Amino acid sequence: MRDRESGFLRKPWARKGPTQGDQSSRLIGVTLTANNNCPIERSTFQVEYEKEVDQGKQKQGRDNSDPIGIGDRVLSKGIAMSLNVTQRQRLLSGFLAAPTMSFMLVFFILPSLLLLLYSFWSARSFVIDPTFNIDNYVRTLSAAGFWRTGVTGLSNGVWTAIASVVLSFPAAYYIVYRSVNNNAFYLILLSWFSSYLVRVYAWRTILGTNGLINTTLMQFGLINQPVEFLLFSPFASVITLVHIMFPFALLLLVSALRDVKTDYIEAARDMGASRFQVLTKVIIPMSYKGIVSAFMFTFILAAGDYITPQLLGGRDGVTNGLLIANQFRSAGNWPLGAAMAFITLVLFVGVYVAFTQLMKACRLSPGRRYHN
Amino acid sequence: MLRMYLWLYVLFLYAPIVIIGMFSFHSSPSLVFPFDGWSLRWYEQIFASRTFRESLWNSIIVATAASVVTTLLGATVALALIRIKGKMRDVIATICAAPIALPGLFLGIALVSGFAQVGMNRSLLTVTISHVLYALPFFVATLRSRIDYFDSSLEEAARDLGATTWQSFHLVTLPILRPSIVGAAILVFALSFDELIITVFVSGNESTLPMMIWSMMRRTVDPTINAASMVALGLSLIVITIAGAIFWLQRSAAISSRTSDLRVEANDQVDSTTEQRPQSVRPVQSFE
């Protein structure tokens, strides 16, 4: 009729509605079963349904174009739904998705494309000249400064990600398999909401020349001069970033480990695997996705952060993120900054590939070896 | 041993914050132990500052606006994701999750280029827009498990029983999603209240609280920063605590209504008057 699917869409009994007739209730068996699980809704709706019947609204709504039709979808999918309803649903979900999708288009996709376009233009004294060239890329790639800061940024990110994942893993393990309640987990997640700047500032207070560590050490007579390397070094950036990323990494690892059921671990133990073998051959491969995402998220957030290196990194701690940010704030060469940003994104992808390959090389990723 | 490790982990997370909190009540400007005594002078100083009060107010406005807009956008797209199946669904879900996988720096510079291109002046409006973009993926991710495991046969069952689309939405779908939506909205408030990396690029003359603290930090080492950061921290914690309280109250209300409903049901079996069932009862599965 309307579609190839609608071959026997309008069965005579299909018009009866679900509450009457044996055949229909057999055919919408799935629906009813689902319904039985929640007696409350069913009763609410029965009441609503009866109300509607009483008010005589029933006829109007049902007769024109909204039959509870049961097509051959019932046979294929076990769901009672007429094509008409499907079409309406499709339209409705289109309407529902439209505002968000247009928001994303206007404020995310188009600006990103514009940025890509910018990176192929050039700027002379704050005026952007839209002629296509790759000077920005050549200039960035040949600048030693970019590579030096890039290495700092990437190493900040990599060290932060390694430290966050490796140090959060035992905590996540304890929370998932040992702990009786989730109090520690909630406490850790709560610290995620302690402001980002507060933590940067806290570490500056702790590591500074007149900070807690130095004054404490001097009071105990362990050192005579304040130790300078603590603050304004990449080390200060990394420890602060690790502190910031911990809750995030832990959340991702906990949700990954929740998928590794204890049955698998017990089975492996029963078959004589040592604790270390269980870890490397069962737990890590089975939570591989979560580990990779924890690593990548902390890496991206840490390597793309320019506030912490600016406030704590000192001269050695300047990252390419800071360089890019400065192009868009003070120096004002937006096209150059855009080119740097895209090169940085490519480097991030490189780190992702390197990390997954490393996991594979260490035989920690789930792979074909299960079948070999 | 693992247990001790966990508490060390928690200690590492909280110790710096506690130290800052203590120094914000320190009576002398020095930031070292031993402690001289307690006072509220830094809080008095910071609240006397007009810039501080204005930025605090701006932050509250932006965070509220961002969480309202994000909730509207995120909830509608979640409803769409429940209904749509197949490839289209993947596309929408990927677009909604994409900003999370990019550094904030990238989003900031992309947005500032976009705003400049269309000639939009940087103001609290641009800040709100950027916060919505930043928070939307978190919102959708929080609702994700609800969306993925949403049993769409519940909605179909409601419609089969004669409910209109609106009825099936506000009597079935919304009660199931509501706790997650409330939680996610509050999460968005906290994220927006704390966001700095993108804000730096898109804010105009009116600064938000993190912007103000950041500029203070770049200029001086000043004990009032302690107090200012504690105010920021305190507000986030209050909001999160409210969220927790709402969750807990809803959960216990649901459990108690569930048990009372069972009691009513037991009575019903005796005198078989099914109409007597309380209509206000909401489905309880939504709380797992």
Image: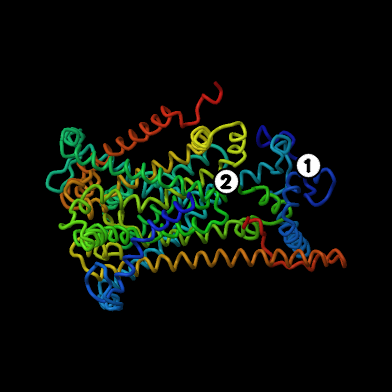
Query: Which dot, 1 or 2, sits closer to the camera?
Result: 2
User: Residue placed at 45% from the left, 28% from the top?
Assistant: A363
Placement of A251 over or under A53, stated as above or below: above
User: Residue placed at 21% from the left, 47% from the top?
Assistant: A317
Left or right, B92 with respect to B261, comes to left
Answer with the quarter of the image where residue A81 lies. Answer: top right
User: Residue placed at 51% from the left, 43% from the top?
Assistant: A256
Three-letter residue code for mark 1: Leu
Task: Tell me the SS state at disc 1.
Answer: helix
Which residue in the protein does label 2 denote? B148
Q: Are marks 1 and 2 in contact (CB under 8 Å)?
A: no
Furthest toward the right, the residue is B271
Instruction: Tell me where residue A304 appears, x and y as whole percent.
Output: 30, 46
Tell which subunit mark 1 falls on. Answer: A
Which residue in the protein does label 1 denote? A27
Instruction: Tell me where residue B100 appears, x and y as whole percent.
Output: 40, 47
Task: Tell me the SS state at disc 2.
Answer: helix
How far is the residue under mark 1 from the one under mark 2? 26 Å
User: Residue placed at 24% from the left, 47% from the top?
Assistant: A234
Instruction: Tell me where residue A101 appears, x and y as whole percent.
Output: 45, 48
Instruction: Tell me where residue B118 appears, x and y as whole percent.
Output: 28, 51
Tell which subunit mark 2 falls on. Answer: B
Left or right, A199 with respect to B278, comes to left
